[in-house]
Every structure is written in structure tokens, then in C-alpha cells.
Amino acid sequence: MTRTTIEETVRQFLTEEFEIDANKLTMDAKMKDDLGIDSLDVADIVVIVEDKFGVVIKSDEMASIETLDDFCSYIEQKTSK
């Protein structure tokens, strides 16, 4: 899966499922501070990522992800294995 496909898929589900303004979805946007993603959202995101990418995210790994770029890089790394 290409990085572009990952970014497009992530942007799509963040916009549709979490109603985040697409203009806020820049790669340097902080997941918590800029996008308003809280711990309940993280649980939903884990399920969505597993469904869309076949990637299992551990909660401690998700806690270390700060920006949208970090998140997409994490998915890219997991899907390339």
C-alpha cells in the first residue's frame, strides 16, 4: 500500500467518522490538540485501522503517536511488513 493511499484513507475516515474538517487534516496536525481526538476516539480509530488496513495498533503505541504524519508513518511501517 502506498503512502498516498494511506493518507487518503486516513483523511477520509477522519472526515467521515469523526467529522473533522478536511482543512485541518495536515500532516503536521497534532492528533489530540489540533484534531480533538480523545481516548474514546482512539478506541474507534484502532478498530477502523484494523478493518481498513489489517493493522493491529497497541494502545501504548497509539499513545506515542502525536501528529497525523506519525500516524500515517506508523500504518505505512506496519503494512510494509
Image (cartoon, helix red, strand yellow):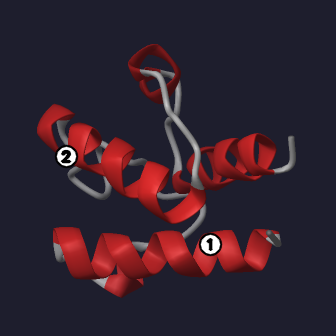
Mark seen at residue 72: none
Separation of marks 1 and 2 at Cα, in angstroms: 18 Å
Residue 48 position in % (x across, y down): 36, 57
Of residues 49 and 18, the one drawn nearer to the viewer in this rendering? 49
Q: Which residue reaches farthest left?
A: 40
Which residue is the site of mark 2? 41
52 to 38, vertically: above or below: below
Query: Pointer 2: residues within 10 angstroms few (<14), some, or many (20+)?
Result: few
Q: Which residue appears at 21% of the width and 72% of the height?
A: 17
Of residues 64 and 45, the one drawn nearer to the viewer in this rendering? 45
| SS state under label 1 | helix
**Image position of 57 (left or right of 13):** right
N-terminal-most mark, 1 or 2: 1
Amino acid on which the number 2 mark rests in the picture: Asp
Q: Is residue 20 visible?
A: no
Locate the N terminus by quadrant. bottom right
Residue 18 position in % (x across, y down): 19, 68
**Image position of 20 (left or right of 54):** left
Q: Which residue appears at 52% of the width and 33% of the height?
A: 65
Query: Pointer 1: residues within 10 angstroms few (<14), some, or many (20+)?
Result: many
Which residue is the site of mark 1? 7
13 to 29, vertically: above or below: below
49 to 25, vertically: above or below: above
